[in-house]
């Protein structure tokens, strides 16, 4: 009865971790730019589908598109992203020097992290709402007793509370990482 809710909650937390890994902490990491959407031949594609992204050193990323005609589109997409990176276009590649974080940028990143955590909590609330409907329908159709429905509701609330606690812990850890100089 609650397996779907558990799956959604796990997905929400995993998604949050993936999104947190994309937050720039003053170090070059290919994950920062891999999912940026770039217009190619009239449709939007993730950067990882059209180029290889690698580290040259701890502060520099190198992007080598497989089709040189999309270099400008990649540079434009990176510039317009929320990452505040400044790509340097070369003949057949793009270089990105990841700047050290300023205090102002750190505060901005904590706001972005809080927004991501709130989105994960919305996923959890949606999972709770869907499961609640399932439980109510099962009770209304006499598939489960009123006592069983209450037990399921209590178990569902425990799952939601645990998930929200995990999300807050992940947010706290990420905020500490961001604010660490």
Image (cartoon, rainbow, N blue to C red):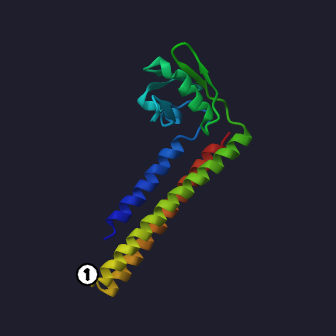
**Residue farthest along the bottom direction in this orientation:** 146
Q: Residue furthest top?
A: 91
Q: Secondary structure at mark 1?
A: loop
The correct choice, above or below, for 145 with respect to 91 in the image is: below
From the viewer's perspective, is 112 left or right of 158? right
Tell me the residue at 42%/65% (across/down): 127
Q: Is residue 58 visible?
A: no
Q: Nearer the viewer, residue 164 or 79?
A: 79
Q: Position of residue 124 (x, y in %)?
A: 46, 63
* Residue for point 43% across, 69% down: 128
The image quarter in which residue 117 lies: bottom right
Numbered-mark total: 1
Percent position of residue 40, x then y: 47, 29
Indicate left or right for 135 with 108 as reference: left
**Quadrant where the image shows the C terminus:** top right
Q: Quadrant of the N terminus?
A: bottom left
The residue at the far left in this view is: 143
Q: Which residue is mark 1?
A: 143
> Dot 1: within a 10 Å radius of its alpha carbon, few (fewer than 14), some, or many (20 or more) residues?
few
Displayed quadrant of residue 148: bottom left
Look at the picture and state if 139 lies above or below 161: below
Tell me where residue 43 appears, x and y as whole percent.
Answer: 45, 34
User: Can you say whether 81 is above or below 75 in the image?
Assistant: below
| Residue at the image position 46 percent from the left and 67 percent from the top | 160
Residue 131: percent from left, percent from top: 38, 70
Is there any visible trace of residue 70 in the rendered image?
yes
């Amino acid at each position: 009865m609650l397996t779907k809710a558990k799956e959604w909650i796990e997905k929400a937390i995993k998604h949050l971790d993936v999104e947190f890994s994309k937050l720039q902490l003053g170090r070059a990491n290919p994950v920062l730019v891999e999912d940026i959407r770039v217009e190619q031949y009239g449709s939007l594609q993730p950067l990882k589908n059209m180029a290889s992204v690698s580290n040259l050193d701890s502060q520099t990323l190198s992007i080598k598109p497989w089709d040189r005609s999309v270099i400008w589109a990649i540079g434009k997409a990176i510039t317009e992203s929320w990452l505040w990176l400044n790509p340097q276009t070369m003949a057949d590649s793009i270089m990105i020097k990841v700047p050290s974080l300023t205090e102002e940028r750190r505060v901005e990143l904590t706001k972005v992290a809080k927004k991501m955590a709130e989105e994960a909590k919305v996923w959890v609330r949606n999972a709770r709402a869907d499961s609640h409907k399932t439980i109510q329908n099962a009770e209304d159709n006499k598939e489960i007793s009123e006592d069983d429905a209450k037990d399921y509701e209590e178990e569902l609330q425990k799952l939601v509370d645990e998930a929200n606690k995990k999300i807050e812990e992940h947010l706290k850890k990420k905020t500490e990482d961001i604010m660490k100089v």
